[in-house]
Image: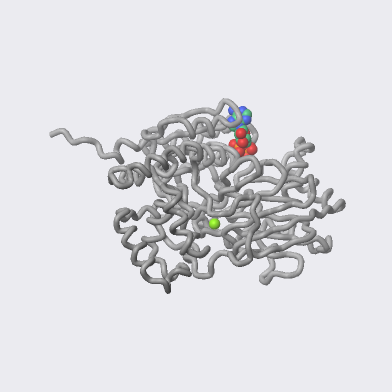
Amino acid sequence: IFVAPTSDERRRRVLVLLNPKSGSGNAREVFNMHVTPVLNEAEVPYDLYVTKHSNFAIEFMSTRVLDAWCCVIAVGGDGLFHEIVNGLLQREDWAHVLPHLALGIIPCGSGNGLARSIAHCYNEPYFSKPVLGAALTVISGRSSPMDVVRVQLQSRSVYSFLSIGWGFISDVDIESERIRMLGYQRFTVWTLYRLANLRTYNGKISYLLRDQDSPEPGRSSGGYGGQYRLQSSRSCNTHIDKLTANPSLHHSSTEYLPQEFADVISLETSINQSFRSRCDSWLSGGSRRSFYYSISESIYHSLADESEFSGLAAASLENRQQNFGPSSELPDLSEPLLKEDGWMVEEGEFVMMHAVYQTHLGIDCHFAPKAQMNDGTIYLILIRGGISRPHLLSFLYNMSSGTHLPEVNNEYVKVLPVRAFRLEPHDNHGIITVDGERVEFGPLQAEVLPGIARVMVP
Ligand code: ADP
Ligand code: MG
């Protein structure tokens, strides 16, 4: 009897992208020596692609048919992983691909914050054999949802899984390139140099605190996939009619709004602009929070099947061809942020802002000890101008052990768990980094997309 292979059986190959230039330039040797034997022993079939240039992984992940692969492994550093995430999120079918493609990393870079964070979150040792540990993680086949942060710069959007920085730490990361010949010591040397020549930057940071009633960190949810509970558009309309008939719900906040309803609205919203304005008129900011999500390919097809929606769905497809990627719930970067919507502000002189969503920024930088991969939280860490040099030095020194943050916020050092923020520098120069890479200087805003990616875990 012929049994057709299930889709799981068809999708079991592993895609490996290897950056031969990462770290000290021996990723290829590391892969052959320490990873290939593990994959062979476990009889895991894989396809290896060696990156040919910068942005190779973005091009690869954004344009290839990926159906044959169950996961993609970056053999390199955080920069390579960043390219993979960004390539995937540029795809028209990102919402369909992302839940089915687990992302893994074999640490071979000079920046290995993600690999270190994953090991830390799962109480795995890292330092004795990081590559072997990561290879075993790959064959374990387990994965967990991971938050990704959408960063809107003036000219474009990028997706980030690690950090956004402005000021001291970003300066040290980027400026110390000029003493690269010192190897890892460059960070220490440049930190001391910058401490002696301390600069501050003027700007405004607005943020939305994480909801107090938001799901607790670490809860086991279906991640982004959980948003796909699809009700028929008809039942959605029934909900709307019920709500419209009940004026007391017009100022509705999330309590009044069943999650299923919010989910359906969110995908309807991305289909139809007039539908959106109809919803907007009686949903306040709170409920609009659930409107992050744009429509997945599969949902698109199921809606397209319903004749009453097919016209709208086709219009939506046209829209999306101009603008792929998850939709944003934030106002445009040029629009003001309103206090009524919950925005809070810190303004003045800053030594730095660093926003992080993983525990480690590098193998010995335990920057946000409370961070979890799927907690929908950006830890916004601010250091104000006026901080004393000894205080700043102890902050920087204690970063390696994760004991640098105060229990309670003080005048100079603040830790804010947020789900979105906007940075508006008032100076016309400075350094801003996303996942450790320099990006254009200027205003930016960021919002967390909870659990949107899947990452391989031990
Ligand atoms: P590291 O942690 O050492 O910086 P990464 O793997 O993160 O190593 O890579 C850093 C950057 O190298 C990536 O952002 C990517 O753009 C670039 N890159 C990838 N492949 C190549 C290549 N074949 N040649 C040169 N640069 C590359
Ligand atoms: Mg997190």
Who's the residue at 68% across and 41% down the image?
439
Q: Residue 39: x, y in percent?
A: 42, 36
Q: Quadrant of residue 239?
A: bottom left
Residue reaching furthest to the right: 197
Count the numbered circles shown: 0
Q: Nearer the viewer, residue 363 or 280?
A: 280
Left or right of 237, for residue 124: right
Q: Residue 260: x, y in percent?
A: 36, 61
| Residue 29 visible | no
Who's the residue at 42% across and 74% down the image?
248
Q: Quadrant of the N terminus?
A: top left
Left or right of 212, for residue 315: left
| Residue 270 visible | yes
Q: Is residue 355 above or below residue 301?
A: below
Q: Quadrant of ligand 1?
A: top right
Q: Is residue 105 above or below residue 203?
A: above
Who's the residue at 56% across and 64% down the image?
210
Left or right of 292, for residue 205: right
Q: Quadrant of residue 204?
A: bottom right
Who's the residue at 71% across and 60% down the image?
382
Q: Residue 392: x, y in percent?
A: 78, 60
Q: Residue 262: x, y in percent?
A: 41, 60
